Image (cartoon, rainbow, N blue to C red):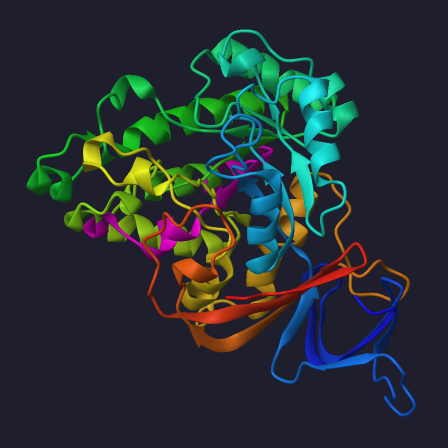
Amino acid sequence: MPERLLLRGGRLIDPGQNLDKKGDLLIENGTISAVGAVDPAGFDGEVLDLKGKVVSPGWIDMHVHLREPGREDQETIESGSLAAANGGFTAVCCMPNTNPAIDSQEIIQYIVDRSRSSLVAVHPIGALTKRREGKELTEMLDLVEQGAVAVSDDHTPVHSAEVMRHALEYARMVNIPVIAFEEDTSMTRNAYMNEGFVSTCLGLRGIPRVAEETMIARDIALAEYTGGHLHVAHISTRKAVELVRAAKAQGVMVTAEVAPHHFTLTDDAVRSFDTNTKVKPPLRTEDDRLALLEGLKDGTIDVIASDHSPFAWEEKSTEFIYAPFGIIGLESSLGLALSALRDTMPLADIIAKFTINPYRILRLEAPQIAEGQAANLTVFDPEARWQPEADKLLSKCSNTPFLGRTLSGKPELVIHRGKMFKSVL
């Protein structure tokens, strides 16, 4: 990035400061030195014309699977960080279902060291239990001191209420959230999609909504009892949204996230047996999808997070029942969110789901558009129409059902840590 950079004529939106105005940004040596009208006369640095573009604080995706260590054939910290920057993110949180799991200071330090020079900040999420086995809690204080921002046994539900209770208590002591993958697996064994009319038509065993909802209800009760912070990962059903909404109204410390594919697609997409529609939680019904949109609009759902889950072509190119659950999302999240929400939510509220809200949940200092602040910015074109193409994705994998789908809203560039990356999407 040039030492002096002038971003001219963009719409500056910072939900954390209630900032929404057209103006310029002057960045010198990686720091914002002026906000507002900047006279370009005699300016000897690089000028970027951002008329029609939006400049916001850098976006964070708090639910990403980077696969390293253990499955570097699917993704690495380097490739995942490039995909994040390409999609408009300056920070990600990596989930602990690696091999070995992120359950020790050594693994966290490895991740921190591997990402130190990247434009994209990588925040590790530590395992909630040792080896993610759901039995013995990890040393959360040690994990936090090394850099963990939350704990989770993601993709492995914590079935023991006693373990979850103590996890919430311990996490409260070290001031981090517990991110819960909510599924009662006794109801979902050998099940492949949402349980309902479509699963019956296709002859596939379904994953019932109640498998998610009963676990959320249990964990809300435990959060209320312990005073711990429960964060519900990738919420997917109407009843689940209602449970979180009611808990918030009662003052329970609970927050929630939703993945773009859950508020964009329904289980009708599975009719083609495209393995890139096989996700967990599964794609639900239109009624559930609409409830997720309602939850985003009224604030019940705090965060949009991709649940970026890369799998190689060979793994997904098999019969539906044998394919793994998961799709990539870092490079399509921005476009999917703006396409689905732009007509019904203020742009600042959408941006908040990617910026101030997740930063607050994770107790991290949120980037700001203000003089003297380090430049940590996401620039996007809210009106650009584009289609994701496999050869323009920087993730190692292209397992997504959104290739060729027209999206409205495209990432342009990100600035962070004194570096600039222009999206190639």
Q: Based on the displayed image, in which of its 4 quarters is residue 183 positioned?
A: top left
Magenta-colored stretch includes residue 246: yes
Q: The magenta stretch spans which residues?
A: 245-269
Q: Quick one: 271 or 162, which is closer to the camera?
A: 271
The single residue placed furthest to the bottom in the displayed view is 41
Rendered location of residue 221, percent (x, y): 49, 23
Rendered location of residue 215, percent (x, y): 40, 24
Above or below, 104 relative to 265: above
Left or right: 262 as drawn, with respect to 40: left
Rendered location of residue 360, percent (x, y): 69, 44
Above or below, 309 relative to 84: above
Inspect this view and state whether residue 282 appears: yes
Q: Quick one: 366 or 113, which is closer to the camera?
A: 113
Query: Which residue is depicted at the point 60% across and 61% down?
Result: 351
Inspect this view and state whether residue 194 appears: no
Q: Quick one: 231 or 367, which is closer to the camera?
A: 367
Magenta-colored stretch includes residue 375: no
Q: Based on the displayed image, in which of its 4 quarters is residue 370 positioned?
A: bottom right
